[in-house]
Amino acid sequence: MSAQIIYGKSISDSIRQELLHEVETFKSKGITPGLVVILVGEDPASQVYVRNKAKACEQLGYYSEVVRVPAETTQDELLELIKKYNTQENINGILVQLPLPKHIEEKAIIDAISVEKDVDGFHPENVGNLMIGDDALLPCTPSGVIELLKRTGNHPAGKHAVVIGRSNIVGKPVAMLLLRENATVTICHSRTQNIEEMARQADILVVAVGIPKLVKKDWVKPGAVVIDVGVNRLPDGKLCGDVDYDDVLDVAGWVTPVPGGVGPMTITMLMANTLKSAKRAHE
Ligand code: GUN
């Protein structure tokens, strides 16, 4: 039997519709959510992401600013810019597009963003609140993964979720969110022994390692939900995930395509975080 495809684009569209209704109510009170996206340098992939974020703001009627500064911008100059937006009242979310040029320390920048405006959910205080289960701005891609699972009826509670990858941006937070949803969670990484065997025990398999087509059909338990967070560019220019999509199709119960699976959810969750932050600011 062939797996059911999880179309992130269509789920993302319906969440955006829900957000649009909420934003309209919010705006009728004279309040508009505002997001600033800061791009340092001219990385082509980052430029596409930043454009898409601005487009999403426009679609939902948010106020948005895109600040493009040269690659030579110093860390202190970037910190000054963040300081300015931390206090600017019409801005509810600040996103500094990563990666940053080598001479800028990523951690110093993330730490400088106000916790309330950290719509990426990368600030240590938001990460800490996620750990202890308090209200927090949650990182966008991991919360997008949880939405995909819930909205396809694949509720994590009681399931064995195996996460391959332990990055701060995806692996660790998605594992924590799955735990919060009452899954039993195993985290695998480059030093894990018998990784295939581990993966094969998963009811829900989340893969975020950046290795093209790493996961083959013999890594997948029949009927499992396979969520592919990887986005890799092949030598022929095509995109592919960390999962060998065609190979797992007749074993998995559900699978996300790349592109069009997890990807579209990230910006949508960013929009949801910005609205949440705006609501909090006006409570
Ligand atoms: N670069 C790639 N993904 C992301 C993300 O989710 N947030 C930020 N700030 N930069 C990124």
Image: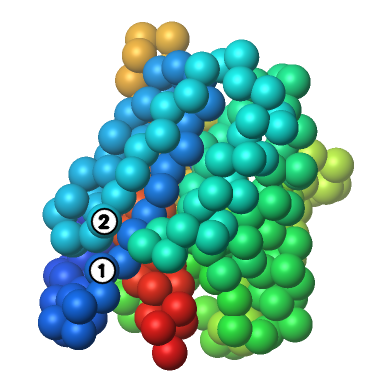
Q: CA distance from mark 1 to mark 2?
A: 6 Å
Report the amino acid beneath label 1. Thr
Report which residue position mark 1 lands on.
Answer: 32
Disc number for residue 216 = none
Quadrant in which residue 173 is drawn:
bottom right
Report which residue position mark 2 lands on.
Answer: 63
Whether residue 103 is visible, yes or no, is: yes
Relative vertical location of residue 113 with respect to residue 155 in this rendering, above or below: above
Relative vertical location of residue 266 with respect to residue 114 in this rendering, above or below: above
Q: Position of residue 101 (x, y in %)?
A: 64, 21
Q: Are marks 1 and 2 in contact (CB under 8 Å)?
A: yes
Report the amino acid beneath label 2. Tyr
Q: Position of residue 28 (x, y in %)?
A: 14, 82
- Quadrant of the drawing holding the N terminus: bottom left
| Left-right relation of 133 to 88 | right
Residue visible at 46% across and 58% down? 88
Which element is circle 2 on? strand
| Left-right relation of 268 to 211 | left
Q: Position of residue 232 (x, y in %)?
A: 47, 28
The colour style of the image is rainbow
For label 1, being within 8 Å of ligand 1 is answered no
For label 2, being within 8 Å of ligand 1 is answered no
